[in-house]
Every structure is written in structure tokens, then in C-alpha cells.
Image (spheres, coloured by chain):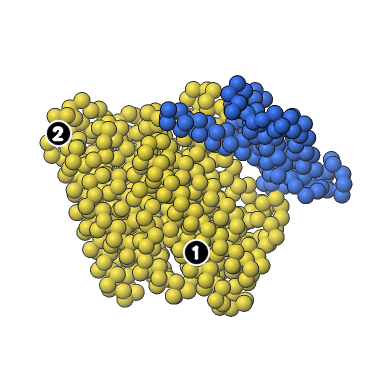
Chain colours: A yellow, B blue
């Protein structure tokens, strides 16, 4: 049986991107409508795919009718549908937020075109079952994100975009080199086939070399600490919806998802690599949060927190235990919700006040009630205060560390969480509480669509903990965790699904 | 040197006038025979773009814009992408995404190989106009910088 749902995740954003660039300039309001409809449809089918996976197990799609390992395949398992939901739901809310926010920029249709291309790239990375296809989609997403960082065409944005482009290209070269080595070793590019070949040929220096290259390449894409230098420049200087998109989902689908897919499903979870991942995770967790506390630029502070939270995710996944992986994946979802919300809040503040400097704000709560309250919820989520979603995932990660006997890592995670709380207390104190500055008497609350998406994301933050209920977890988080834990069973499942 | 006329010297202009049509024709040949001989949409698209860039180098940018302006190039670029995607979706209607439906490939037959010639043409639109736009943007940016210096 063929299932035509899978290629739709790439077709819809690609088609709407090019229709946008063709007609967006000619018809006013066209690009707003088509982008919102496209992302809404993507969000709906991604949620539908979760239930599809629950019923039928893994789905493999043969592109062009050619069966793998010869042809290109698209593979959907629990992890894929989990990532697709994360990417597309967040993308929908960011898309409706942009309707109002992007008014201040010219050439809105170009923005939507690049935005949808980026979604196409991310969905492609997540859904691809072919190593080289993964690389191609990764480049689509990365190159459109370079352009989007520079979308404001201001000095700061262009500089950050150039830096990001150079670092990103270095990362892509490492990844391509890793793929080349694996291809020379296994003579195949299909992930499932590659995994079987590697298992058959046994351990080799080439696989180890490729693992190191992948760790550097995808580590750079996901901004783990020794490779994080591009993120604090690139994320703040982009327009707010793009900052939300980059921090919320791009670093996860291009970096973390690819790391998980390659290290667990293709190369088989090696304890050596996993312990490197754990150490890098703890390092990012601590360094990110310590650098964040001193920042006065609101978006820069949030960007440093992205590094720190990615550390939590990688720590959880690097543990390699079922509980650790569950915590890591759950934190991935939660982080994309609350970090996008925080960036959207910072965008709303910038929209109203015109600055990102915390020292120039103050008492915004009086004028911007919705922004202030949603940002309070997001801040408490990221700091891990019960009952918000961040608390549950952090708790699972810490419990998993204790369970696996890594008490030092658990301690670091607790300290990191406390420091996060401290820096978000600073944000709340300087931006939203306190006296309203006399210069800010004229400001207004953000427009309707910006408020709408912020409120819905805040509701998800509050209700996120419900995903851990046994019945819900069995459908959504459970299959994702099992897909990661399956390891090299992935290859057998792919070939079994083909029959 | 030549303040009256934009572009390069008489020798370059004459040679360009003679060769540019051939270059364009060669590009079209490469695109249309992409499925039965070496080459294809990408290579042919680059050659087609080069013929316009050639005019721009020899006669100045106005002469090139008279033949194809930026709006048209941008339109063809999006059109190429949509054409390619449409061909892929048509394959989906008859079985699989990107399925090559229709007739099978025959050696030395121009009208064969199903959707592949059409895909080549779509890619040629995309690559040709895309490359042309890149060069146009480089040219325009350079002019802007010179004006700033004055």
C-alpha cells in the first residue's frame, strides 16, 4: 500500500513558497493567506500522522516508484512524526504572528517565500530516509535561514548572517565529508541499508572518523558549546518570527534530530559517542546559562538560553536510557514551544517599544498585559517551575541522570535550572515589572494576530505536562522514544515495511 | 576610454554579435537533448544564462535588460520551480511522487523518456534565470558602490 501523506510535507511548503514568489507581489494580502493556510494544513497533517503511525507502524515511501536501497525513500516512524508535529505546529503560530509583525518590512512575500522554503528543508530533513537527501534538505533549510537572518538588511543583521553563513558552511562541509566517508565504506546512501552494511562489516576507523565529523557538523548546527559562536549573533539580529523559528525548531531539526537519527539509527548507539554527547551537553548547559546572565540585550539573552537548553536535550538523549531519551525528547518539544513564545514576546516588545535593551524598558505590564503575562508563563516554563511543561521535562532528565548514576550531571542540571530562573527574574524585573518609564507612556499592545499566537503558545506551555499522562504518552512521546531506542532495528523495520 | 557608448571595444562587440546566437542555440540544444546525451537542464540553463551575460559584458547592462528584464527573469525562475514540482506531482497522480510515467527511453530518440525532457526544461528555466539574476545583482551592487564613492 502506498501512502501519499509523506511527500506532502515537502510538496506543500515548496509549492506555496514558489506560488508566493510568483503572485505575492501582484496580489495584496495573498502571501499572508496562502502561507497561513499552507502551514495550518501542514500542522493538521502532522498531527494526523501521529495517529497514523500508532495504527500502522513505520511507513516507507518510495520516491519515483524505485525501491530502496536503489531509490530514494522517505521514512516515517515515531520520532519523525514527533519532530514533524514540533516543526509544523510552531511554524503555523509563527506564520500567523508574522502577518502583523512583518508589516514594518518591505517585500513581505519574499519573507514568506524563504520562510516556507525553510520549512520545506526542515520537513525534508526529518522525513528523509536517504543520507544524501538529508544533506540536500539540510542545505535548503540552512541557506534560506542565512538569507532570513539578513532580512532586515541592517548592518548588524548582515554581519551576523555572514558569520552564520561561514560557520554553517563549515558545518555542512564536515557533514558532507562524513557522508562521503560512509559512502566509500558501505557503497550505499540509504540509511537503512547503510546501517545494515556497517553492522555486517563491523567496527572500523572510517566509521569512527565519520562519527567525529558528524558530531562536529551537527554539533555546529545545533550550537553545542565549543561550536556555539554563531548563534548569539545570528538569532538576535533576525526578525523576531525568524529568531523564534531558528531557536525553536531549526537547531533541533537540523542539529539534534539529525544527530539522533545518525548516531542511534544508522551508526548504532556507541557508548563512547554517547558519553561525548553527555559531556558536551553539560558543558553547553552551564556555559550557555552563565553567559546569558550578564546580557542586557533581551534577544541575545534568549539566544544564550537556547544554547543552555539544547545542552539539557543532548544530556538527556546522551544518557541512552529510556527515561533519559523520553526526557530529552520531551524537553525538545517544550523548549521549542516556550523559546518560540519568548522570542515572539521579545518581538512584540520590540514592535511596541522599539528597543531590545532591557535597561530602556520597565513597567511594560501596565501597557502590554498579554505580552507580559504570556512571557511570565514562558519564563516560568523555561526556569522549570511546576506545573509548567519545562518542569516536567527537566525533572525527568534529572531523574534519569540519578537513575543512571551520573550524580554530577544531575547536580549541574539543577544548578543550570536555578541560574536560568535567576536570569529570567532579571528579564521580568527590568522589562515588565517596576515603574513605567515616562518615555514609554505612548506605547500600545501588539496587534491581534501577534496576541493570538502568543496566547495559544502560552496555553500549550501550561497544558504541556498533560502529554506525560500514560494514555497520551502512549500515542505521542512513547513511539518517539521507542524509535530512538530501537537503534539498528530501524534498518530491519524499514525493509519489513517495504514488503 | 569609450565614454559615448557603454560596453567593450568594437572587436569584442563584433565577435559577441556573431557568437551570442550560437551560444543560445547550443544551450537550447543541451537542454533538449539532456535525456539522451551528456548535459541536461542545469548545464544547458547555465549556457543560456551565459549568452545573456555575454551581451551584458559586451554591450552594457541596458542592452541585456532590453532582451530580458529582472521582472521577467524572476518570473521565469519561480515558473521553473513550479513546473518541476508540477511534473513531480503529476507522477504522484499516476502512482508515486516523481514517478516517470509515459513512454520509456529510446536511444537517440528526442521524444522519449517520459517526463525527463520536461523536467530538464523546468530546471533550465530555474537555473538560467537564477544565474542571470545573480550576475545582475552583482553588477547593480557594484554600480551602487561607485555612486557612493562619488
Residue annotated with mark 1: A214
Question: Tag 2's secondary structure?
Answer: loop
Q: Nearer the viewer, residue A419 or A210?
A: A210
Residue A205 in sight from this viewpoint: yes
Q: Quadrant of residue A384?
A: bottom left
Give the quadrant of residue B117.
top right
Nearer to us of marks 2 and 1 is: 1
Q: State yes or no: discs 2 and 1 in contact (Cβ < 8 Å).
A: no
From what the image shows, is residue B10 above or below residue B100? Answer: above
- Seen at 47% across and 60% down, the residue is A217
Going 58% across and 36% down the picture, which residue do you hit? B135
Q: Chain of mark 1?
A: A
Q: Evaluate whether residue A268 shows in this view.
A: no
The disc placed on residue A436 is 2
At x 30%, y 66%, the residue is A398
**What chain is tagged by disc 2?**
A
**Horizontally, is B109 left or right of B89 in the view?**
right
Q: Position of residue B47 (x, y in %)?
A: 70, 40
Residue B136 position, x and y percent, is 57, 33
Which class describes the residues within 10 Å of circle 2: few (<14), some (14-19), or many (20+)?
A: some
Nearest the eye: A99 or B145? B145
Please, what secondary structure does the residue beneath circle 1 have?
helix
- Local crowd size for mark 1, using a 10 Å CA cut-off: few (<14), some (14–19), many (≥20): many
Q: Which corner quadrant holds the N terminus of chain B?
A: top right
Amino acid at each position: 500500500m502506498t501512502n501519499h501523506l509523506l511527500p506532502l510535507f515537502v510538496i506543500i511548503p515548496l509549492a506555496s513558497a514558489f506560488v508566493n514568489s510568483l503572485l505575492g507581489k501582484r496580489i495584496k494580502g495573498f502571501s499572508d493567506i496562502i502561507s497561513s493556510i499552507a502551514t495550518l494544513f501542514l500542522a493538521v497533517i502532522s498531527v494526523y500522522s501521529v495517529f497514523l503511525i500508532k495504527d500502522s507502524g513505520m511507513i516507507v515511501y518510495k520516491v519515483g516508484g524505485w525501491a530502496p536501497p536503489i531509490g530514494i525513500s522517505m521514512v516515517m516512524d515515531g520520532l519523525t512524526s514527533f519532530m514533524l508535529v514540533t516543526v509544523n505546529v510552531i511554524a503555523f503560530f509563527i506564520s500567523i504572528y508574522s502577518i502583523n509583525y512583518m508589516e514594518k518590512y518591505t517585500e513581505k512575500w519574499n519573507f514568506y517565500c524563504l520562510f516556507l522554503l525553510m520549512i520545506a528543508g526542515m520537513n525534508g530533513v526529518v522525513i528523509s530516509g536517504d543520507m544524501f537527501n538529508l544533506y540536500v534538505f539540510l542545505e535548503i533549510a540552512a541557506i534560506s535561514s542565512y538569507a532570513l537572518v539578513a532580512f532586515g538588511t541592517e548592518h548588524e543583521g548582515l554581519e551576523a548572517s555572514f558569520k552564520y553563513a561561514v560557520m554553517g558552511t563549515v558545518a555542512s562541509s564536515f557533514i558532507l565529508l562524513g557522508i562521503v566517508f560512509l559512502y566509500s565504506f558501505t557503497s550505499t546512501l540509504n540509511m537503512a541499508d547503510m546501517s545494515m552494511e556497517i553492522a555486517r562489516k563491523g567496527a572500523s576507523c572510517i566509521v569512527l572518523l565519520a562519527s567525529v565529523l558528524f558530531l562536529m557538523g551537527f554539533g555546529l548546527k545545533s550550537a553545542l558549546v565549543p561550536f556555539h559562536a554563531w548563534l548569539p549573533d545570528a538569532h538576535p539580529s533576525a526578525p523576531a518570527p525568524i529568531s523564534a523559528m531558528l531557536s525553536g525548531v531549526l537547531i533541533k531539526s537540523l542539529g539534534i534530530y539529525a544527530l539522533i537519527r545518525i548516531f542511534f539509527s544508522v551508526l548504532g548507539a556507541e557508548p563512547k559517542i554517547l558519553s561525548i554527547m553527555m559531556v558536551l551537553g553539560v558543558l553547553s548547559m552551564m556555559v550557555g546559562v552563565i553567559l546569558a546572565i550578564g546580557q542586557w540585550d533581551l534577544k541575545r539573552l534568549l539566544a544564550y538560553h537556547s544554547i543552555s537548553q539544547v545542552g539539557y536535550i543532548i544530556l538527556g538523549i546522551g544518557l541512552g536510557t529510556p527515561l533519559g531519551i523520553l526526557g530529552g525528547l520531551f524537553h525538545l518539544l517544550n523548549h521549542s514551544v516556550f523559546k518560540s513564545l519568548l522570542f515572539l514576546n521579545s518581538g512584540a516588545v520590540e514592535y511596541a517599544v522599539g528597543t531590545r535593551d532591557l535597561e530602556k524598558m520597565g513597567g511594560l505590564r501596565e501597557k502590554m498585559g498579554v505580552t507580559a503575562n504570556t512571557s511570565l508563563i514562558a519564563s516560568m516554563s523555561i526556569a522549570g517551575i511546576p506545573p509548567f511543561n519545562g518542569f516536567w521535562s527537566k525533572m525527568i532528565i534529572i531523574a534519569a541522570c540519578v537513575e543512571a548514576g551520573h550524580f554530577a550531571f544531575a547536580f549541574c542540571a539543577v544548578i543550570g535550572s536555578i541560574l536560568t530562573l535567576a536570569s529570567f527574574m532579571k528579564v521580568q524585573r527590568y522589562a515588565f515589572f517596576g515603574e513605567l518609564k515616562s518615555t514609554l507612556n505612548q506605547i500600545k499592545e501588539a496587534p491581534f494576530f501577534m496576541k493570538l499566537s502568543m496566547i495559544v503558545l502560552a496555553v500549550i506551555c501550561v497544558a504541556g505536562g498533560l502529554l506525560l499522562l500514560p494514555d497520551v504518552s502512549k500515542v505521542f512521546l512513547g513511539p518517539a522514544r521507542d524509535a530512538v531506542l530501537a537503534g539498528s532495528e530501524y534498518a530491519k523495520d524499514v525493509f519489513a515495511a517495504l514488503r | 576610454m569609450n565614454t559615448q557608448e557603454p560596453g567593450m571595444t568594437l572587436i569584442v562587440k563584433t565577435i559577441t554579435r556573431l557568437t551570442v546566437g550560437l551560444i543560445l542555440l547550443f544551450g537550447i540544444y543541451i537542454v533538449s537533448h539532456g535525456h539522451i546525451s551528456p548535459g541536461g537542464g542545469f548545464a544547458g540553463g547555465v549556457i543560456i544564462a551565459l549568452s545573456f551575460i555575454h551581451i551584458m559584458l559586451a554591450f552594457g547592462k541596458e542592452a541585456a535588460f532590453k532582451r530580458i528584464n529582472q521582472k521577467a527573469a524572476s518570473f521565469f525562475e519561480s515558473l521553473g520551480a513550479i513546473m518541476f514540482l508540477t511534473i513531480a506531482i503529476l507522477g504522484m497522480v499516476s502512482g508515486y511522487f516523481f514517478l516517470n510515467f509515459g513512454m520509456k527511453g529510446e536511444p537517440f530518440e528526442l521524444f522519449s523518456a517520459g517526463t525527463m525532457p520536461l523536467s530538464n526544461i523546468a530546471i533550465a528555466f530555474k537555473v538560467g534565470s537564477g544565474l542571470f539574476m545573480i550576475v545582475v545583482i552583482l553588477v547593480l551592487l557594484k554600480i551602487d558602490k561607485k555612486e557612493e564613492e562619488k
